[in-house]
Amino acid sequence: MRKDNINSLEEWKPMAAIEKYLSVSRETILQYINKKGMPAHKLGRQWRFKISEVDEWLRSGNAADVGGNSP
């Protein structure tokens, strides 16, 4: 792989970064992964995310309230 391709690769983010990015708890993110198909990848025991995938998932409308009080 060429060096310029390495520089253009998107960084994998840990759970804590996604919690902060979305302003939600770890439990909410785990619910999104399990019930709403949030894009996430497991590396050993740790979850990793790509911001671009999370953004695309949000725009798709799949992030609707998990178990909320909607009628």
Image (cartoon, rainbow, N blue to C red):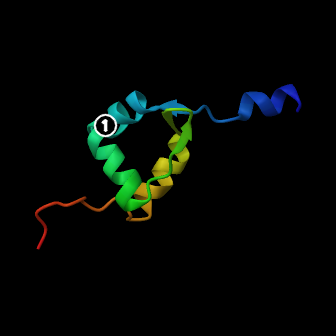
Image quarter of the C terminus: bottom left
Q: Residue furthest front?
A: 45
Image location of residue 68, percent across then percent down: 16, 60
Tell me: 41 left or right of 18. Answer: right
Q: Is residue 26 above or below residue 30?
A: above
Residue at the outermost bottom position: 71
Q: How many marks?
A: 1
Dot 1 falls on a residue whose secondary structure is helix
Is residue 23 or residue 16 the one in the foreground?
Answer: 16
Residue positioned most to the right? 2
Q: In screen coordinates, is 29 left or right of 67?
A: right
In the rendered structure, the answer to whether residue 48 lies left or right of residue 24 reads: right
Q: Which of the 4 quarters of the picture holds residue 65?
A: bottom left
The location of residue 43, given as percent across then percent down, is 57, 35
Image quadrant assignment for residue 2: top right
Depth order, front residue of 67/53? 67
**Local crowd at mark 1 within 10 Å, few (<14), some, or many (≥20)?**
some
**Residue drawn at (50%, 51%), measured in percent from left and top?**
39
**Amino acid of disc 1:** Arg
Question: Can you give x and y, in whole percent of width and height, for residue 25 in the image?
Answer: 26, 37
What's the residue at 56%, 32% (across, down)? 44
Residue 30 coordinates in the image, percent (x, y): 35, 46
Pick the front one: 38 or 3: 38
Q: Which residue is mark 1?
A: 26
Quadrant for the N terminus in the image: top right
The residue at 41%/29% (across/down) is: 17
